[in-house]
């Protein structure tokens, strides 16, 4: 039997929709946006949401003609109230994937549950090491030889969802927080678009609390790359 759909492809098939949440410069946002623009990631960036009105990423997104929503968290009396407004804004964009790209807010369980399995985060450590803040400083203080960055699915426990992909970065003699952070960030810009691409292609999923790739469970570390 002939496959009419494959013989007569339609150009108006909707691409997966991505919403990206930022709080700062938006460097990871830009790497994803650029790969969407050049066709490496076959998706649409439906919108950018930022909780910091003066963040550099806001103007950078507008310079690329992206739809930007700013929700200043200082205008709300509680984290729960802010997250209700955030959920409404996210839902307005009707995303298939929510990408946290330097979004410096701890999310409430209600919000996480709403998007569980379709929300990714990037964290500058080799999770489960160094959940939370100041990861570069903590790696240096511990005398680690290796540091890095992880993309993971978001769950209700902070920085604890199943890992998707990690990049390992060696710690050099004489490294400071700043030099280590710069090398880690270079790897962030490589691995985050990869994870987003896998998701929108339908290859990456979270099933029963596990990250799966092409239907098979991923290792606890996720895919591990040497930076």
Image: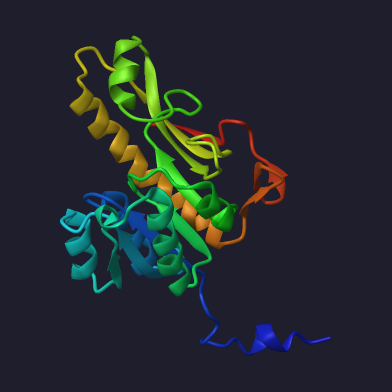
Q: Is residue 174 visible?
A: yes
Height in image: 27 above or below 36?
above
Q: State how many labels appear.
A: 0
What residue occupies the far top of the structure in this picture? 143
Q: Is residue 38 visible?
A: no
The colour scheme applied to this rendered structure is rainbow
**Residue 21 in the figure: left or right of residue 60:** right
Residue in view at x 19 percent, y 20 percent: 176
Q: Position of residue 222 (x, y in %)?
A: 56, 36
What residue occupies the far right of the structure in this picture? 1
Q: Quadrant of residue 183?
A: top left
Quadrant including the C terminus: top left
**Residue 49 in the figure: left or right of residue 199:** left
What residue occupies the far front of the structure in this picture? 77
Q: Quadrant of residue 187?
A: top left
Residue in view at x 64 percent, y 39 percent: 218
Q: Position of residue 148 (x, y in %)?
A: 39, 29
Q: Nearer the viewer, residue 149 or 130?
A: 130
Q: Nearer the viewer, residue 78 or 118?
A: 78
Q: Position of residue 6 (x, y in %)?
A: 67, 83
Q: Position of residue 225 (x, y in %)?
A: 47, 34
Q: Quadrant of residue 188?
A: top left
**Residue 87 in the figure: left or right of residue 2:** left
Height in image: 186 above or below 39?
above
Quadrant including the N terminus: bottom right
Residue in view at x 23 percent, y 69 percent: 64
**Residue 155 in the figure: left or right of residue 122:** right
Residue in view at x 15 percent, y 56 percent: 54
């Amino acid at each position: 039997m002939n496959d009419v759909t494959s013989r007569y492809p339609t150009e108006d098939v909707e691409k997966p929709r991505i919403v990206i949440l930022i709080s700062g410069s938006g460097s990871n946002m830009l790497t994803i946006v650029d790969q969407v623009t050049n066709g490496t990631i076959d998706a649409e960036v439906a919108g950018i949401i930022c909780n910091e009105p003066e963040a550099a990423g806001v103007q950078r997104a507008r310079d690329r003609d992206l739809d930007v929503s700013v929700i200043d968290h200082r205008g709300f009396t509680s984290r729960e109230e802010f997250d209700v407004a955030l959920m409404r804004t996210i839902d307005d964009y009707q995303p298939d994937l929510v990408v946290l790209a330097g979004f410096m807010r701890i999310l409430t369980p209600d919000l996480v549950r709403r998007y569980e399995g379709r929300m990714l985060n990037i964290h500058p450590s080799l999770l489960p090491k160094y959940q939370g803040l100041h990861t570069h400083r903590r790696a240096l203080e511990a005398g680690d030889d290796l540091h890095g960055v992880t993309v993971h699915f978001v769950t209700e426990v902070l920085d604890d969802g199943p890992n998707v992909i990690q990049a390992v970065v060696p710690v050099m003699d004489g490294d400071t927080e700043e030099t280590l952070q710069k090398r880690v960030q270079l790897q962030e810009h490589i691995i985050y678009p990869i994870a987003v691409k896998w998701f929108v292609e339908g290859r990456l999923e979270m099933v029963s609390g596990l990250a799966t790739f092409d239907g098979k469970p991923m290792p606890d570390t996720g895919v591990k790359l040497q930076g």
